[in-house]
Image (tube, rainbow, N blue to C red):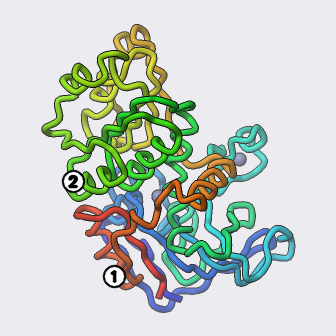
Amino acid sequence: MRAIVKTKPSAGVEFVEHYPEPEIDVDQVLVEVGATSICGTDAHLYAWDASAQAFDPQLPFVMGHECAGTVVRIGANVRSLAVGDRVAAESHIFCGACYMCRIGNAHNCYNLKLLGVTRPGAFANYVALPASVCFPLPPTLPFDIGALFEPSGNAVHAVQRAGNLDGCSVLITGAGPIGLVLIQLAFAMGASSVVALEPNPFRRGLAAKYGARALDPAKADLDAIVRADYARHGGFDVGFEVSAAPGTHEQILRAVRREAIVVCIGLPNRAISLDISEFIAKKMIVLKGVFGRRIWETWEILLALVEAKRLDLAGMITHHLSIREFEHGIALLKSDSAKVIISPN
Ligand SMILES: [Zn+2]
Ligand SMILES: [Zn+2]
């Protein structure tokens, strides 16, 4: 089968035409990949930078963790799925036995393996998945939309962490794919206004299309915006930090009101210092984080919103490429793009 394989601890990947098909064990299914999408994590793995090495992947491995496809073979113990089922993959492969799994927090399993990072991934014709991480898709849902459930789920989980957004003003730093889903979700969940900071003009255009006031962080004067439009509350009610760009955490903590909730989704590649006295103790901001999706609550909320057409994932797809064009896809992430879909053929 065709596969994108990370073989060396340096920048780059290999496109392999004849890579061995994965074997499945009794609890797994073999999925014929219908569509995958490229994530910022894939760009880090491609570049083999500090963020990539922090995951401690073992070379060589097949990359790709955002995927949907058709079950073509099932292990002897699998009862929940049948050949022909259409599924999307939860990329956080949990053990099911540790404390976090037992209390319903499988996304934060102590023995977590990450699809396409610390387990063979889905930039290939076939991927082996534990049946326990397969999310059944309705028959009419296209695979490219199904592949976007994994990244979009991060945004849904971030909103779950933020709580009630009724009437809230929301500040989002970063309008990449997750920021764009957050903008739509914030409005779907009752937010009154959304300001999104995003340096790329193309992505600002998408953010504006979804109803946000999209501003260039290099030019936006957040103090002036808060004084002009959010003075009654003393700042934004809720903040979502997505970009992990230098300085955004400080920026968001300054722009939100006292006792606001700030949810961190972006992964900075180094430690950041924060004024705890100012922001956490005195301003009493509640700082939270998300990593992955609540299994399966987040997925079901996402599916319901997509089926109700309250969330537009198709509008975020800017490119469809074949697996041979993978490196072009990585380059596109740095230019005018949102989601790049990779077909295995
Ligand atoms: Zn991802
Ligand atoms: Zn576990």
| Horizontal arrangement in the rendering, residue 258 relative to residue 91 (left or right) | left
Q: Which mark is residue 325?
A: 1
| Horizontal arrangement in the rendering, residue 133 relative to residue 56 (left or right) | right
Quarter where residue 129 is shown: bottom right
Q: Write the residue at 50% across / 37% down.
A: 190
Q: Which mark is residue 181?
A: none
Which amino acid type is shown beneath numbered disc 1? Answer: Glu
User: Height in image: 151 above or below 191?
Assistant: below
* Mark 1 within 8 Å of ligand 1, using the beta carbon: no
| Horizontal arrangement in the rendering, residue 95 relative to residue 266 (left or right) | right
Quarter containing the N terminus: bottom right
Quarter where residue 251 is shown: top left
Which amino acid type is shown beneath numbered disc 2? Answer: Asn
Indicate the position of residue 228 as horizontal and vertical percent values: 22, 22
Q: In terms of depth relative to the viewer, which is nearer, 219 or 98?
A: 219
Q: Write the residue at 62% across / 49% down.
A: 298
* Disc 1/disc 2 C-alpha distance (Å): 23 Å
Q: Residues within 10 Å of mark 2 (few under 14, many from 20)?
A: some
* Residue occupied by mark 2: 200
Disc with the residue nearer the chain's start (1 vs 2) = 2
Q: Residues within 10 Å of mark 1 (few under 14, many from 20)?
A: few
How many marks overall? 2
User: Height in image: 304 above or below 326?
Assistant: above
Q: Write the residue at 54% across / 52% down.
A: 153
Indicate the position of residue 295 as horizontal and vertical percent values: 67, 50
Indicate the position of residue 227 as horizontal and vertical percent values: 23, 19
Q: Which numbered mark, 1 or 2, is in the foreground of this view?
A: 2
Quarter where residue 206 is shown: bottom left
